[in-house]
Amino acid sequence: MAFLFSTVNIFPEFLEKNYKDSFLASLFNFKFYSGIKEGVYLSQQNFSSSKNSLGSKKSNIYVRLEPDTADYYSGNTEFLDNLLISLSISNNVKILPRNKEQSMRFNDSKFSNIEIATKPLTLENIYENCDLFIGAGGSMSRELAFLNITTLSIYQDELLEVDKFLVSKKLMHHNPAPKYEDIELLLHNSKVDIDNELIEKGLSAFNLINAVVNDLRQLENKNAS
């Protein structure tokens, strides 16, 4: 429906095959930018390549829980409990809940070794302290993958095209039912440096979108005068 009211539609490159050669291309104006949506804004920020330590030899694992109340999500819930309990014995595991109900669930004594974030954390804070990010959602997983933090998507629904793109580029791992051994393997292959190619694509995407918006603004001003 949005196509009917738009002057131009700007999509990430991995969707180009869906629209460029379809009948829609003759009806609507499409442009495609490099990389992923998260790269458009993250490319405008400076992230240090240095990593902090919490003063422990344990690895720091951040876990973003599933979007259990979202209309678009029909996957499993509470499927990580036993794995997280096992991981918390030898690692620092921090839960990033989405709502009060998820926070309350992890207050159970069986999760005593697991830390629960009581307020939203900045992306910078997570990046600086994270050795492995486990995400049951989307955007936050892609943000950490963009920053080249070892990222495991455990998304329970059909994987989105953008996530398939990141997996194909080996910038994200996907395993909806990981075992303890899978996590340990990822921890031993943690990355540190930011992927410069993806940053360059983000800058290119930002410049493209900025140019399109400016052109439309100038055209509007010209028509108004």
Image (tube, grey):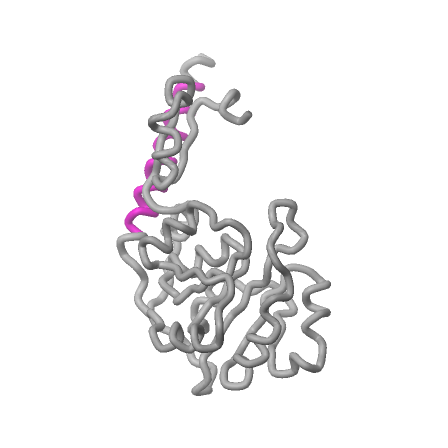
Identify the residue at image location x=34%, y=46%: 35
Q: How many labels does the image show?
A: 0
Near-viewer residue (135 or 211): 135
Query: For residue 169, what is the image quadrant?
Result: bottom left
Above or below: residue 218 compared with residue 171: above
Above or below: residue 4 compared with residue 99: above
Q: Does the magenta stretch include residue 214?
A: yes
Q: Which range of residues does the magenta coloring cover?
A: 199-220
Above or below: residue 104 compared with residue 153: below
Secondary structure character of the magenta stretch overall: helix
Identify the residue at image location x=65%, y=55%: 68
Query: For residue 25, what is the image quadrant?
Result: top left
Q: In screen coordinates, is 88 left or right of 25?
A: right
> Where is residue 182 shown, x and y percent of the image?
43, 73
Near-viewer residue (204 or 69): 69
Query: For residue 93, what is the image quadrant?
Result: bottom right
Q: Is residue 36 magenta?
A: no
> Where is residue 77 shown, x and y percent of the image?
64, 61
> Where is residue 47 shown, x and y percent of the image?
37, 62
Quadrant in which the N terminus appears: top right
Near-viewer residue (49 or 174): 174
Quadrant in which the C terminus appears: top left
Identify the residue at image location x=54%, y=60%: 136
> Where is residue 157 shown, x and y percent of the image?
54, 52
Q: In screen coordinates, is 68 left or right of 173?
A: right
Above or below: residue 66 compared with residue 117: above
